[in-house]
Amino acid sequence: MADLVLSGPITAPPSRWRSALARGGARLWIGGGLVALLLLIALFAPLIAPHDPAEQNLMSAQLPPAFMQGGEAAFPLGSDSLGRCVLSRLMYSARTAVMVALIASLLAAIIGIALGLIAGAFGGWIDQLVSRLIDVWMAFPPVLLSIVLAAVIGAGLTSVIAAIVVVDWTRFARITRAETQAQLARDYAAAARVLGLTRAQALRLEILPNLVPLIVTLLAVEMGVAILVEVILSFVGISVTGDTASWGGMITEGRQIVYQSPWIMALPILAVIVSVIGFNMLGDGLRAALDPVQRR
Amino acid sequence: MRWSAILKRLALIPPTLLGVGAIVFVLLRVVPGDPIAMMIPPGASPADITRLRALYGLDQPLLSQFITWLGQVAVGDFGRSISLRQQVFELVGARLPATLELAALSVSMALLMGVAVALVGSLLRGTRAEWLLDTANGVFLAIPDFLWALILLLGFGVLLPLLPISGRLDPQLAVAFRTHFYLIESLLTLRLDVAADLLRHMLLPSLALALPFAALVARLLKAQLAEAEDQDYAQIARTRGFSRTTILQREVFPNALIPTVALSGVQVTLLLGGTVLVERIFSYEGIGNMAIDAVINRDFPLIQGLILTFAVLFIALNLAVDLLVALLDPRLRHG
């Protein structure tokens, strides 16, 4: 009897985590890296910023970045019209951006998912009500709605966050509603009911976990959107007040002296772009990594 | 789309508009800012202020203000702008054409660019260049219109001043226009110098609006092209000796177009919403720019009129896209 020869060493199947990371690909890594960098800067801004962001040095106003002609090493990315350090203000603005992004997207997600889940699962008049509400919301130009809202509530961080939540909950509600309906139509949802789970239990134990990949992806994208809305509101002149540094405020101030010192406007634009692309790539990567259909 | 479906959609329009109107109305009236305070001259007496409040109906209770407004809107009277002291209907009518021309130019540019990128991307399928194109497309998609506006302003207005960055027309070229559709009118009356100047002013703002939309069209169309190219009929055409370019043009493209129109059409509303900020950035005299001024001045009647105008445009666009898809797709013709 011939010996049974096993060819090659026996290896364990790749872990779910590892295969998910592989599916996410470069987008997941680059996006995750950029977002992590943003979070670190926001968290450690007081430690790494060379200056106090509100400290004015009128003797050295509108300096170009240090690597350009006329720059000073004390101001690595130059100074603004009041002689405040641009690099320090960029770093402190990251704090504002991250705070707005985290709080606003989480609140929008909680409201949107709750309404979407209820509408999708229970149907009937509740679904009608939520759907009509979404219709009305979709008929508003979102930018204009957030401007009106922020004007109503008054300037400040709370106002920016409230404007984002009130405008953007529909993003989560629409998709959660559609996905809940799709999941409920599947066999496993029916099986859960046959096994004796109540509707609420089936929603919590079976449907919601299947929505998680979608929600995580939406959250990442929404954080990018939230950063943009803050910039928009600053631009129109109704965002954070006083000495709170924000990218939107920096862009608005930079625009007034754009002909003399274009970098003052260009640098915060660059920061916004890099952050938004980071969140978008992270969202794309997460979608690929967490998609249960591709989980083989 | 069946007739009954169209009727149902049409029937939902009035309640949606009513909802939009009610929300804006209530929202504006909890504003702490007072529009009258912004328009009175420094020496006005309290009696003058009371008279002005009564003139604009601001002394009435909220519900009766809303009902009065609804009754007026129903007969086409949107009230008088508080800050500009003209009929809202006339103000919006004078500015809307500027926004429509800008949006139409942006959509056309975006479609041209998007289709071109999708076709090139399909021909490059499986190569390193395709990956590069997709990545670049992703970046264009991630940066929204108003950031493009700021980038273009910085690039072509400041660093490399080639194009005008503010207004709609060089004041020296002021022509007595009969309509507010300046571009269309100047083309029709063969004032090509005026048309060229209008286009030069529109180029940067419309490019800012077009770039992210073009990237969206490119991404959707490219995915649809890839799917259609893998279908049997495309494979068979290939084995019969037709070139890939011919098949792409004649067989695959028409089939990929329908889902692309359906998916991207709805996003035209986003482009239209984007005009608000882009017009502001380039001081373009459309309704978006006007809306921001109206909010800053707490001009209730004007804000209400403008938001309703946007809402009507959004709803009409969505309906138009659904009808267009139904027209393009033979499978939907019979419901």
Image (cartoon, coloured by chain):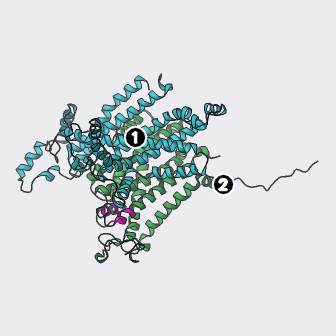
The chain identifier of the residue carrying mark 1 reads B
The chain letter of the green chain reads A
Image coords of residue B43 (percent x, y): 6, 56
In which image quadrant can residue A63 be found?
A: bottom left
**Residue A259 within the magenta-colored segment of the rendering:** yes
Numbered mark located on residue A15 in the image: 2
Residue closest to the eye, A109 or A280: A280
- Dot 1 amino acid type: Ser
- The circle drawn on residue B108 is 1
> In 3D space, how far apart are the residues under numbered discs 1 and 2 (Cα atoms)?
48 Å
Q: Amino acid at mark 2?
A: Ser
User: On the rendered structure, is B49 left or right of A102?
Assistant: left
* Label 2 chain ID: A
Q: Colour of chain B?
A: cyan
Q: Residue B296 at what x, y percent from top left?
A: 23, 52
Q: Residue at x 50, y 45 (%)?
A: B117
Query: Magenta residues?
Result: A250-266
Q: Secondary structure at mark 2?
A: loop
- B159 or B268, nearer to the observer: B159
Main SS category, magenta section: helix
- Is residue A189 visible from the viewing direction of this image? yes
The image shows residue B223 at horizontal and vertical percentages of 54, 41
Camera-nearest residue between B4 and B221:
B221
The quarter holding residue B13 reads top left
Residue B33 place in picture, x, y as percent: 20, 53
Q: Secondary structure at mark 1?
A: helix
The answer to whether residue B25 is visible is no
Q: Is residue A255 magenta?
A: yes
